[in-house]
Image (tube, rainbow, N blue to C red):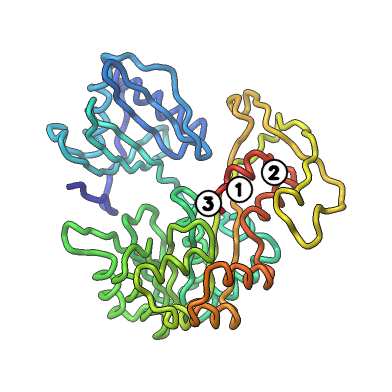
């Protein structure tokens, strides 16, 4: 059974030259840092292995490493992450801190998974929170920002952030917590695991093997006089029940769900056993989000202007204002990809009186979605195409990122 890493005192390990495997590991870390990769994948096959970097949500393969270095490379990582190098039959999770340069330290979460051809490793870079965690920096537009601010500043209720894995949900929750972290509130989180430390916030890492689940941690937190509770994810009926009761008894509760859009969160909670009237009484706001790859400013090229109204019907059709669409081309600055960095898009659905009445009455998702659109909640597809009109991304990227929304 795997174990989850938590915040423990880690000493930054130096990376001396200890042989070919150590040099290859150092070179891989350097490439990951240069390309701002979020993850490093080490994948074995029968007669070889490969290293891939996830950059802006997409995997890119590095030059083929020497086959004979595979085992030494894996052992090197496991030693640094304090994993059992003799255990290759079950998954293991660890964490490492490396001094990659004078005065520069990087943290990684390490996951080792047994496969038919050896252990697969994934190293996730745990970057510090950005200096700018404003809603605008996360991609919320001028119309959405006041809606989010109003919900976050409410004294109690439930705020949900939805989207697939890797869509930036946790960062959004941290931004909300930063808005609330003014010293006058007791803020507590339950995460699996807590990866980034938030000064002034009490963070708890779930340890299911030890019996510390989301639900048990939440019950304990409610005896700690919290004002704000952040739950990493609502996964089951027990956690959902505790979260809703907390939201209805004077606490502001923030959490995430894996759904394609904001109305889908309602269906998901009802599916796992939440009573519609309880959800309607507790809900404050649901947001859905995606991350779009941002066109490289150095090489983006003008493209044929599409008819956006044919892609997503809107009351006003295609905007009449002049705008220029762009497509990806590729240059040395973006390593030939055509994209560099990402930007968030959001669907913001406040829990209005009309929406809550529909939810409490058990209305269909179609009816709830229609009401949200009538109240001005733009879909993720509309938000993505707004970024196209701003020249920040391409039509192809906007459509691919919102294909399921």
Residue 214 x %, y %: 29, 66
Q: Tell me if label 2 and label 1 are in contact, CB under 8 Å.
A: yes
Q: Tell me if label 1 and label 3 are in contact, CB under 8 Å.
A: no
Residue at mark 1 to residue at mark 3: CA–CA distance: 14 Å
Q: Residues within 10 Å of mark 2 (few under 14, many from 20)?
A: many
In the image, which disc is placed on residue 393? none
Q: How many marks?
A: 3
Residue in the image at 65% along x and 26% along y? 330
Residue 292 x %, y %: 59, 45
Closer mark to the observer between disc 3 and disc 2: 2
Q: Tell me if label 3 and label 2 are in contact, CB under 8 Å.
A: no
Q: Give the residue at mark 3.
A: 130
Quarter of the image for residue 254 reads bottom left
In the image, which disc is placed on residue 392? 2
Residue at mark 2 to residue at mark 1: CA–CA distance: 8 Å
Q: Give the residue at mark 1.
A: 343
């Amino acid at each position: 059974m795997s174990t989850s890493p938590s915040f423990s005192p880690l000493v930054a390990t130096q990376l001396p030259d200890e042989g070919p495997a150590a040099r290859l590991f150092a070179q891989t870390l350097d490439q990951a840092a240069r390309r701002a990769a979020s993850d490093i994948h080490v994948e074995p096959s029968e007669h070889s292995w490969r290293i891939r970097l996830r950059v802006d949500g997409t995997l890119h393969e590095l030059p083929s490493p020497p086959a004979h270095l595979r085992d030494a490379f894996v052992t090197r990582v496991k030693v640094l992450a304090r994993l059992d190098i003799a255990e290759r039959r079950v998954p293991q999770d660890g964490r490492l801190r490396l001094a990659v340069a004078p005065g520069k330290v990087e943290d990684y979460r390490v996951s080792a998974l047994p496969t038919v051809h050896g252990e697969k490793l994934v190293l996730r870079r745990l970057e510090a929170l950005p200096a700018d965690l404003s809603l605008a920096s996360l991609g919320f537009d001028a119309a959405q920002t006041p809606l989010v601010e109003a919900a976050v500043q409410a004294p109690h209720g439930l705020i949900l952030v939805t989207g697939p894995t890797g869509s930036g949900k946790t960062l959004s929750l941290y931004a909300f917590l930063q808005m609330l972290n003014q010293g006058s509130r007791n803020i507590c989180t339950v995460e699996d695991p807590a990866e980034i430390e938030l000064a002034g916030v009490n963070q708890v890492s779930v340890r299911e093997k030890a019996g510390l689940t989301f639900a048990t941690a939440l019950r304990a937190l409610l005896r700690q006089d919290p004002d704000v509770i952040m739950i990493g994810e609502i996964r089951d009926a027990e956690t959902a029940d505790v979260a809703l009761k907390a939201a209805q008894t004077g606490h502001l509760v923030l959490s995430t769900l894996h759904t394609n859009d904001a109305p889908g969160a309602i269906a998901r909670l009802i599916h796992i056993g939440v009573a519609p009237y309880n959800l309607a009484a507790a809900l404050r706001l649901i947001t859905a989000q995606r991350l779009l790859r941002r066109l490289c400013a150095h090489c983006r090229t003008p493209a044929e202007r599409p008819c956006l109204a044919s892609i997503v019907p809107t009351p006003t059709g295609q905007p009449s204002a002049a705008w220029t669409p762009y497509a990806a081309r590729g240059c040395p600055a973006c390593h030939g990809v055509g994209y560099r960095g990402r930007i968030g898009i959001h669907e913001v659905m406040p829990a209005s009186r009309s929406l809550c009445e529909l939810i409490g009455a058990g209305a269909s998702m179609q009816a709830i979605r229609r009401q949200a659109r009538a109240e001005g909640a733009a879909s993720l597809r509309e938000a993505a195409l707004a970024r196209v009109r701003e020249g920040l991304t391409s039509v192809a990227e906007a459509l691919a990122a919102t294909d399921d929304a």
